[in-house]
Amino acid sequence: MLKSEFIVSQLAIQFPSEDILLITARPVIKAVTNFKQVSKVLEEFDVEEQPKTMLENRFPNVKVIQSEVKQLKSKEHCILTGDGSQHVYEKLCLCAGAKPKLICEGNPYVLGIRDTDSAQEFQKQLTKAKRIMIIGNGGIALELVYEIEGCEVIWAIKDKAIGNTFFDAGAAEFLTSKLIAEKPEARMAHKRTRYTTEGRKKEAQTKSGAGNLGSALGPDWHEGLNLKGTKEFSHKVHIETMCEVKKIYLQEEFGISKKKSLPFPRDHCNQSVTTDKEAWPVYVELTNEKTYGCDFIVSATGVIPNTEPFLCGNNFDLGEDGGLKVDAHMHTSVSDVYAAGDICTASWPPSPFWQQMRLWTQARQMGWYAAKCMAAASLGESIDLDFSFELFAHVTKFFNYKVVLLGKYNAQGLGSDHELMLRCTKGQEYVKVVMQNGQMMGAVLIGETDLEETFENLILNQTDLSSYGEDLLDPNIDLEDYFD
């Protein structure tokens, strides 16, 4: 939905005499606020929900239709919506995002967190919970395990270390120490305004039940939510690594199975011989043969592109991840149909320092660039690939640390022909750079390092750094004096 707001705004400004139509199943849209260009590529911003009338009030040529899409008839250049209407287009951009990849469909004790409604439902369920289980190792899981208080958390991940999507084992260890400690710091002030739709609550629930997806959560989505269970403690997290869900039992099924569940592990004691006496609504058997009971399960195992409403009768080329393939101009394989954000798969030859990840920063960049491409095509003009696709750059926050990811930050695609350089100050910062042939290819910065702009330039310029050796990360050397 953030992509839609950018595309609509850009096109409405460039083509004031043309009708711009936005079709959305939700009564709200996501809008970018407090935008800050940190460096050439790095950007920070907040995302807030605003009423759909905001766009219509700003742009007289924009009309927002609240209805789900039933069918795309690309040969006829028209969209059929749930209210029975038919809308003809000259050019179309699909920004339907992605949907949660749930570990189990139809189980009332399995929650996926994707949009505002599901986040609020999670908060509601958490207020009554003594223990929950989180399955997954991506961004949502990382944020949840740190933010939840007053509730035991069993965190099951299929990897050896936490945050495998973003971090190596060293960074994971650095962050884990923060996870198992008390949280002394106060919550940061919540600076976003929120638009609520109380009057449409019943309607939203009906739509949710029908399988319609709201727009994805923004960065820092948990700010403003009270993620607290029934207990009076801060963190209580136990991590089960190298495992997945084998089977989920409801309480009655578990009783019939005669299996035994484990209590919450404490103080690293070997409790494998003890049995949990508590009766839980749901039980999870893991592939490591351990079974835990809990109040509910959070499925945070990633997303899949939400292409289903558009595939029937249309000849879209799909990527291996199920997304709509787009070329360097965000155009799909279907004439006059573009795509941006989580629904698409970038299929152009990428820069050596860029890879697609389904993150808010790329959603904003793709939406803005797709609008430029649609405008250029309408005017018969050529356009170069946007500079934001030269370098992967993402800034976020995990465990209350600032986290910056640059380029091939985990040595993606570099094989064994690379080396790592590390600098770590426990509790303060973690710096890792990925080097190849004396040149910087990527970096992970955790904490207030102030190195992001310098490292970004070093990667983009491919400066020969071989003569600096280990001094490159010497904290007593001001790199900006060397390379600015």
Image: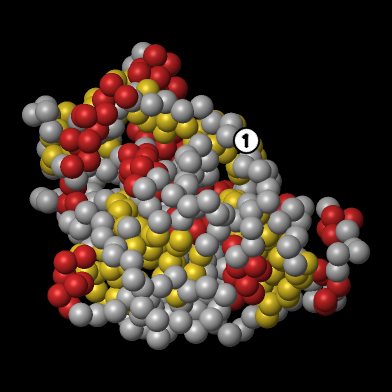
Answer yes or no: is residue 350 visible: no
- The quadrant where residue 192 appears: top right
Among all residues in the image, which is located at the extreme front?
Answer: 277
Q: Which one is in front, 337 or 428?
A: 428
The residue where tag 1 is placed is 189
Answer yes or no: is residue 296 visible: yes
- The quadrant where residue 197 appears: top left
Label 1 is placed on what type of residue? Ala
Q: Which one is in front, 186 or 258?
A: 258
Relative to 162, is 207 above or below? above
In the image, 286: left or right of 317?
Answer: right
Relative to 26, is 146 above or below? below
Q: Which one is in front, 193 or 6?
A: 193
Residue found 22% across the figure and 54% down from its top: 108
How far from the left and from the top, in percent, is residue 410?
57, 71
Q: How is the image coloured?
A: secondary structure
In the image, 391: left or right of 108?
Answer: right
- The quadrant where residue 325 appears: bottom left
Q: Which one is in front, 47 or 69?
A: 47
How far from the left and from the top, in percent, is residue 361?
51, 47
How far from the left and from the top, in percent, is residue 211?
19, 45
Relative to 374, is 154 above or below? below
Residue found 46% across the figure and 77% down from its top: 241
How many residues crowd around disc 1 within 10 Å: few (fewer than 14), some, or many (20 or more)? few
Residue found 20% across the figure and 72% down from its top: 254
Give SS at disc 1: loop
How far from the left and from the top, in percent, is residue 7?
40, 34
In the image, 459: left or right of 394?
Answer: right
Residue found 42% across the figure and 33% down from its top: 30
In the image, 23: left or right of 153?
Answer: left
